[in-house]
Amino acid sequence: MSRAKPYVLAPGAEIRDLNGLALKAGTAETDGAIAVYEGARPGHTSGPALHVHDCEDEALYVIEGEATVQLGDEVSTAASGSFIWMPRGVPHTFANLGDAPLRLLGFAVPSGVEELFASLPRDQRQLDPAKIAEIDELAGRYGARTVGPPISACK
């Protein structure tokens, strides 16, 4: 039987900040079942490097704006209201190539990846190249690894 307790989180509230992502539910709240987080990107910004999760499936729901999403070798556009499924083992990333802000609601099943998000620098795209090996080592502790560059947001 789950030890999770039911709760309602008010609009704009978060369990904690994950370096720019607002955690809505995590391991402690769901007894490990799911992590839910909300994030935003201004226009013309890249997302994370192309990466793979080995321990969880991930999904994104586009609340506002338009995401350019790479799943494996395929790149597509996900407009507001779109749902993106990223099963474990599939390389994925996203970017906001448009002018408008992008807001996403993310889900990870099972939970746990939120601890990786909390450990990463707020803006991974501006990292000194010397820090990339450090990030990859950290990600590896959570069953994730970088497999390529982010989608470029350059005009």
Image (cartoon, rainbow, N blue to C red):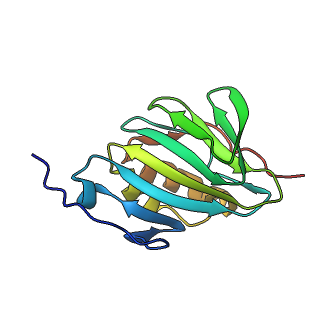
Q: Nearer the viewer, residue 54 or 141?
A: 54
Q: Is residue 132 visible?
A: yes
The answer to whether residue 142 is above or below residue 118 is above
Residue located at (85% from left, 52% from top): 154
Tell me the quadrant of the picture where the N terminus can be found: top left
Q: In this view, does 150 lie to the left or right of 20?
A: right
The reply, left or right, for residue 134 in relation to residue 99 is left
Task: Answer with left or right where residue 128 lies relative to residue 10.
Answer: right
Percent position of residue 123, x then y: 62, 64
Q: Where is residue 134 in the image (x, y as percent from the top left)?
A: 50, 55
Please tell me which residue is depicted at 56% across the width and 61% down the height of the picture. 39
User: Can see residue 50?
Assistant: no
Q: Is residue 14 above or below residue 5?
A: below
Q: Position of residue 122 (x, y in %)?
A: 57, 67
**Residue lying at the far left of the rendered structure:** 1
Which residue is the extreme one toward the top? 73
Q: How many labels does the image show?
A: 0
Pick whichever, 146 or 5, lies toward us: 5
Residue 42 horizontal side relative to residue 99, left or right: left
Q: Is residue 42 above or below residue 70?
A: below
Residue 140: quarter of image? top left
In front of the other: 152 or 135 = 152
Q: Which residue is outermost to the right?
A: 155
Judge by depth and name the residue closer to the eye, 70 or 98.
98
Please report the residue visible at 41 percent of the width from the left and 54 percent of the height from the top.
36
Measured from the top left, where is residue 83 in percent x and y? Answer: 57, 39
